[in-house]
Image (spheres, rainbow, N blue to C red):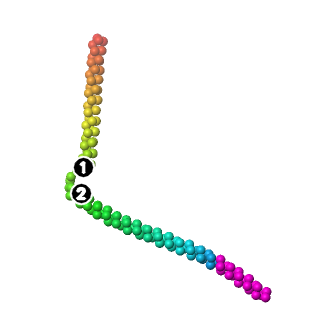
Amino acid sequence: MLKLKLTTGTTVQALNTLKNHLNGLMNESTWLGKEIKSRTDQLQKLQAEATTVQNELVAESRLKKKLGQAQSDSGGMPQILDYVQQKAEMYEMEQTLRNWERKVEIAEMASKKAKAARKLAQTQGK
């Protein structure tokens, strides 16, 4: 009877160890199942995104081709924005030129006044 109890105790211990091991494996299996589902969903999303990007790439290449053809058709014609920018720069330079001309006139008048004052001072000093 004692021998049978020892055998039963050993068997129960082995059974508990195996149950714990099985429980760990079941938890790991559940985690792996969730991980597989998650990665499968992620793969589907990435494939859909890759398809969208591929379609956008095709559309962009068509647009680039059309724009390149339109640009070659326009030949040596200047762009409108370039023309507008050059006109704005021209007006700005004309304004700067007028400012400098006014400054030169003022400096010339000041120079004439200074010469006249010097001449007057020289004549009074003699």
Specify whether residue 6 is painted magenta: yes
Q: Amino acid at mark 1?
A: Ile
Quarter placement of the N terminus: bottom right
Specify whether residue 109 is painted magenta: no
Q: Secondary structure at mark 1?
A: helix
Residue shown at the point (29%, 12%) measured from the top left: 124
**How far from the left and from the top, in percent, is residue 110?**
29, 23
Q: Nearer the viewer, residue 17 or 97?
A: 17
Asked where in the image residue 113 lies, by quadrant, the reply is top left
What residue did someone put label 2 on? 71
Asked where in the image residue 69 lies, by quadrant, the reply is bottom left
Answer few, some or many: residues within 10 Å of disc 1's Cα (few below 14, many 20 plus, some between 14 and 19). few
In the displayed structure, does residue 60 sit left or right of residue 20? Answer: left
In the image, which residues are magenta? 1-20
**How far from the left and from the top, in percent, is residue 76?**
20, 53
Magenta stretch mostly in which secondary structure? helix
Pointer 1 with pointer 2, Cβ within 8 A: no
Residue shown at the point (43%, 68%) measured from the top left: 46
Taking the view exactly as shown, the residue that stands out farthest to the right is 2
In the displayed structure, does residue 23 sit left or right of residue 74? Answer: right
Find residue 80 and name its label: 1
Relative to 103, does residue 89 appear above or below in the rendering? below
Residue shown at the point (29%, 17%) measured from the top left: 117
Q: Secondary structure at mark 2?
A: helix
Q: Nearer the viewer, residue 71 or 52?
A: 52
Asked where in the image residue 112 lies, by quadrant, the reply is top left
Q: Nearer the viewer, residue 54 or 37?
A: 37
